[in-house]
Amino acid sequence: MKNLKGAALLGQSGGPTSVINASAAGVFLEALKHEEITEVYGAIHGIKGILNEDFYDMKQEDPKELERLKYTPSSAIGSVRYKLKDVEKDPTDYLKLLEVFKKYNIRYFFYNGGNDSMDTCLKISKFMAKSGWDCNVVGVPKTIDNDLAGIDHSPGFASAAKYVATSTMELYLDGTVYDHQQVVIVEVMGRNAGWLTAASALATVGGVKPDLIYLPELPFDVEKFYTQVGDLLKTGKSVFAVVSEGIKTKEGKYIPELESEIAKDAFGHANLGGTASILAEHVKERFGVKVRAIEFSLLQRAAAHVASNTDIEEAFMVGKLAVQAAVNGVSDKFVGIVRKSSNPYEAEFPLLPLEVVANAERKVPLEWILPDGKGLTQDFINYALPLIQGETPLEKVNGLPRFAQLKKIRVVKK
Amino acid sequence: MKNLKGAALLGQSGGPTSVINASAAGVFLEALKHEEITEVYGAIHGIKGILNEDFYDMKQEDPKELERLKYTPSSAIGSVRYKLKDVEKDPTDYLKLLEVFKKYNIRYFFYNGGNDSMDTCLKISKFMAKSGWDCNVVGVPKTIDNDLAGIDHSPGFASAAKYVATSTMELYLDGTVYDHQQVVIVEVMGRNAGWLTAASALATVGGVKPDLIYLPELPFDVEKFYTQVGDLLKTGKSVFAVVSEGIKTKEGKYIPELESEIAKDAFGHANLGGTASILAEHVKERFGVKVRAIEFSLLQRAAAHVASNTDIEEAFMVGKLAVQAAVNGVSDKFVGIVRKSSNPYEAEFPLLPLEVVANAERKVPLEWILPDGKGLTQDFINYALPLIQGETPLEKVNGLPRFAQLKKIRVVKK
């Protein structure tokens, strides 16, 4: 489907990352270069923006601000969590999307998100093709969770990993500073895949070794954990543990679920805390030691000031290449990342079928995980370390980040 | 007391900061230059290290690593929370300190800490003078809380403020990204003084305005807060609030205390959460909205990667000047910071009596605080903004901070 003339539309979906806007910048800046592309739209809150015909007109933005988007966290055009139903069950949304695509002559559609979003991309692509509306659909991957299948790593992961590793180094130094013992438990995002929790092991390269690192890939034995903490406390030192929010017992219970059951039995009242704070409270009760539970929370996916420049440039690249591919007639694909070499680090960006990544989930290989929370193997370090290289060139004004300031001019509804 | 010949000893005390080690670097590197100073010791865990005759020999460290201390968070020689009793009540510690000072010929003593530590400094100084042991004692101020009296600001505050302002900008962008409404409540350190919470208002300079900012200087009306959040939610937008860990009701109750009373009444079981998580849970119950409670916790005092270079250089300076003063015969003083001009920013470092700062507490002027959590005045911005200028020259290796790696060689006990 070459030489389509019409509008390009980008939507962002799912949890933002520090560099999802770098992909948006790649899409927008590249789209603005092609004469086949008559308009450049940003869907406000992803699919919902399309269903509501709610778009920003990216042509009216200052290209300098679009450049700054590379270094600006969060989804500048707004994100959404919205799963399209199967078209057989309910075609309503699809028919509306088709109507909007026709009304605004959308011939290039890009969707920037994780595995759910790649599934959305695929569904839309198939429906447009079936309906006879020529439109090239290309997926742009992102996720801090690094769980996208079929590619070496996901844009967004490395910046979050750099944040986790850097903060682990800093917190470790702080948390072990007193003469009295302290147990610090840090909680990292990643419900099913432990890539980001594993990134705390990169701190060892900087000379700081967390005592315990627990990923969701292996069952978490709560009693064993307390025993381990107790044994470490006997050595007289402070203890530093990193746990994934997604650790589960071998019965498949998350820690807050487990606690909720215990608490309900005892008091009819569930504990508000997350995984780290529940574990920390029990450690405090058992060992009478000072504890600190620290959740990286949204910080780990928003800390653009410590983003990896490798990640920024790759995120930009996948956006840019998505547009080039679409203009060259490619559809039903996403831009992948394949590693050619780790030392020196080198990657390629092939176009891969959306089916590869849609709804699949890639976890940390079990052979990279040392048993009993002892950390990660050198293979993991060799994998992850090249990705966090390079500092963000984010401009500072008044000592603060100068993030993109978009005009956000809405397209007049037709 | 000029021309004393003997050892110099530095102790660090209280909660660390991103730049307390910059002051240590100032003390050590300057002390190594003076021939009056025969040995340079670091007390391991402050006063406790002295009582236990437990010192690091700083002369054996690589000067390059001591330079790197400028950019390394936490207390490299270990900190402590230990309050000396009044000498009239119990002279035991004082007599031991005197014995150790004599045994190791300690003629220059520097204590790096907050108002408690300056009080410790004063007590030791008085006791040594009374006991006839010639020793010049000079205080080196630090605290992220910025509550030291008699000086313009405290080393450590500005770096934490820069972290708070930067993270507020990033979190705000992330927290307001979805089409559904969300309430983010961020909790900042500062039990009695709201300086650091106020620093979130610096984000406005970067184009991001938190909806509500609550400092501990004014009573916190819990019901009014919920009403405000409800009113903001009615506008259709997400809500971003920043609260100090130290906010109290007009009856003087901290939020976790209040919650504990409510919870005990209802279930005999207290909530584990901190201020932000308790408020967030109630907001969720009342408005059925998605909430996020985020505690900056130790991150705000350890995030050396985003330290203010103005702060780093000032922290180094107060350490260096403390040594120069002591060698010139000064005692019973601390090195203060007085602002000469805000634009361009210029400061002086006078020697001030320890009595000025010992046990006193300086809060945010009430006239800088807008009522009902509406933020801070331009006067506060004008005060704080110059302090967060300049980026840390912290070296990166492998994409990670290259913090100081000390040999930490212990002095053989005499």
Image: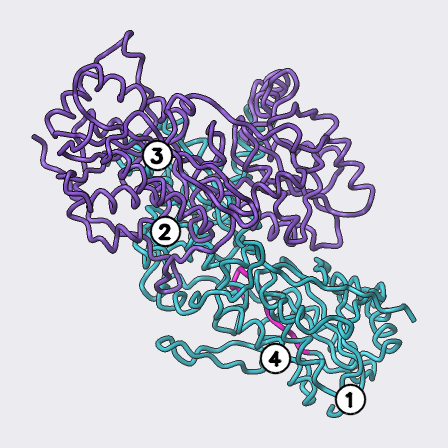
Chain colours: A cyan, B purple
- Asked if badge 2 and badge 4 are on a common chain, one would say no
Q: CA distance from mark 3 to mark 1?
A: 70 Å
Q: CA distance from mark 4 to mark 3?
A: 62 Å
Residues marked 4 and 3 touching at CB (< 8 Å): no
Q: Identify the magenta region.
A: A138-147
Pointer 2 residue: B71
Return the x and y of residue A196 as percentages of the image width and height: 47, 57
Pointer 3 residue: B140
Residues marked 1 and 4 touching at CB (< 8 Å): no
Chain letter, disc 4 residue: A
Residues marked 3 and 1 touching at CB (< 8 Å): no
Return the x and y of residue A406 as percentages of the image width and height: 72, 64
In the displayed structure, B238 sits above or below A27; it is above
Element under disc 4: strand
Pointer 4 residue: A353
In the displayed structure, B267 sits above or below A147; it is above
